[in-house]
Image (tube, rainbow, N blue to C red):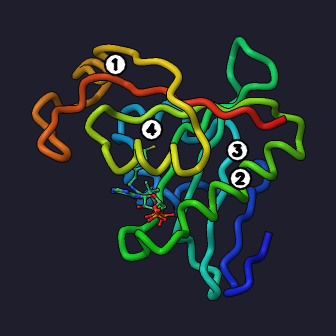
Amino acid sequence: MTMRDGFRVERLTDGAPREPCLPLLLLADEPGPLRAYLHDGDLYVLCDEAGNPVGVTLTLPHPEEPGTVELKAVAVAATHHNRGLGQRMLRGVLDDLRARGARRTIVGTSNAGIGQIAFYQKAGFRLWQIERDYFTPEKGYDPDERENGLPHRDMVWFDLALS
Ligand SMILES: CC(C)(COP(=O)(O)OP(=O)(O)OC[C@H]1O[C@@H](n2cnc3c(N)ncnc32)[C@H](O)[C@@H]1OP(=O)(O)O)[C@@H](O)C(=O)NCCC(=O)NCCS
């Protein structure tokens, strides 16, 4: 999907190398957990007019709920924040998921990600559930890391109906 200003969202073909997108994916998750799903699901890339990757979304089919897809990692390069690109990337990804038969999408973000919590609601997602004590050192999360002055502790889950 190409946008008026030349930005476009592409789904990488199966087997295409994902390593060039690692710096972007690492904005959304820690290296340990990311490594576990880096090569699973589909990777969507938002490219600028010159073809450089400036945003990524990794999607995974839900293992137990056919028709539900999780947005596992969503990120836009810090140099491009707050220009509406994240919302535009999400719209491109959700349109593609819908066209390929997905009926519902879910996404989780940390309790400390106040901006992300706003971002997903502005994209139409509804609060769904809280998974307490999700961010543990065993899973690769630093208990001392803070965002907005808050420790990462609980996962805030959102969902959105696509049909
Ligand atoms: C979350 C993220 C993808 C948003 O990308 P973006 O391109 O900056 O988002 P947009 O410009 O499309 O923002 C759209 C809306 O969300 C809101 N928003 C985005 N980040 C925000 C923040 N940190 N605080 C408050 N609101 C925020 C904006 O206010 C904007 O609303 P508006 O149009 O009414 O002003 C980006 O901040 C990012 O990559 N963060 C690091 C990775 C991450 O945390 N990913 C999510 C966890 S998986």
Which residue was labeled with disc 4?
34
Disc 2/disc 1 C-alpha distance (Å): 26 Å
Name the residue rendered at 81%, 51% in the picture. 96
Tag shown at residue 93: 2
Q: Quadrant of the N terminus?
A: bottom right
Disc 3/disc 2 C-alpha distance (Å): 10 Å
Which residue was labeled with disc 3?
42
Name the residue rendered at 82%, 34% in the picture. 102
Tag shown at residue 3: none
Q: Quadrant of the C terminus?
A: top right
Disc 3/disc 1 C-alpha distance (Å): 24 Å
Is 101 drawn above or below residue 135 in the view shown?
below
Closer to the N terminus: mark 4 or mark 1?
4
Say whether marks 4 and 3 touch (CB < 8 Å). Answer: no
Which residue was labeled with disc 1?
134
Q: Residues within 10 Å of mark 2 (few under 14, many from 20)?
A: many
Closer to the N terminus: mark 2 or mark 1?
2
- SS class, disc 4: helix
